[in-house]
Image: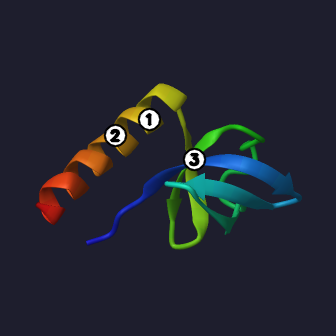
Amino acid sequence: MCLAVPAKIVSVDDNIAEVEIAGVVRKIGLDLVPEAKLHDYVLVHAGFAIQVIDEEEALKTLELFKEIMKHEIS
């Protein structure tokens, strides 16, 4: 199963961005979404942003992930 995770762009340098995912910062490529900019939310898959997404939708999805993790740990 493949999963794309919402992340917020916290810095951009050319086509490389640093994104924050659940408190972890990592570098990703922006080659597939050159329109992405600082503070945008993007879907990240395999080290690349694959789509710019709405902040509200990103936050809802992240909240769902948290709920799933609570039930998996219990």
**Kind of residue at disc 2:** Glu
Rendered image quadrant of residue 29: bottom right
* Contact check, label 1 and label 2, Cβ < 8 Å: yes
Foreground label between 3 and 1: 1
Secondary structure under the numbered disc 3 in the rendered image: strand
**12 vs 52: above or below:** below
Q: Residues within 10 Å of mark 1 (few under 14, many from 20)?
A: some
Q: Residues within 10 Å of mark 3 (few under 14, many from 20)?
A: many
Foreground label between 3 and 2: 2
* Contact check, label 3 and label 2, Cβ < 8 Å: no
Q: From the image, tell me which residue sits under label 1.
A: 59
Secondary structure under the numbered disc 2 in the rendered image: helix
Residue 63: image tag: 2
Q: From the image, tell me which residue sits under label 3.
A: 42
Q: Quadrant of the N terminus?
A: bottom left
Which residue corresponds to the image point at 73% horizontal and 59% vertical from the top-left? 18
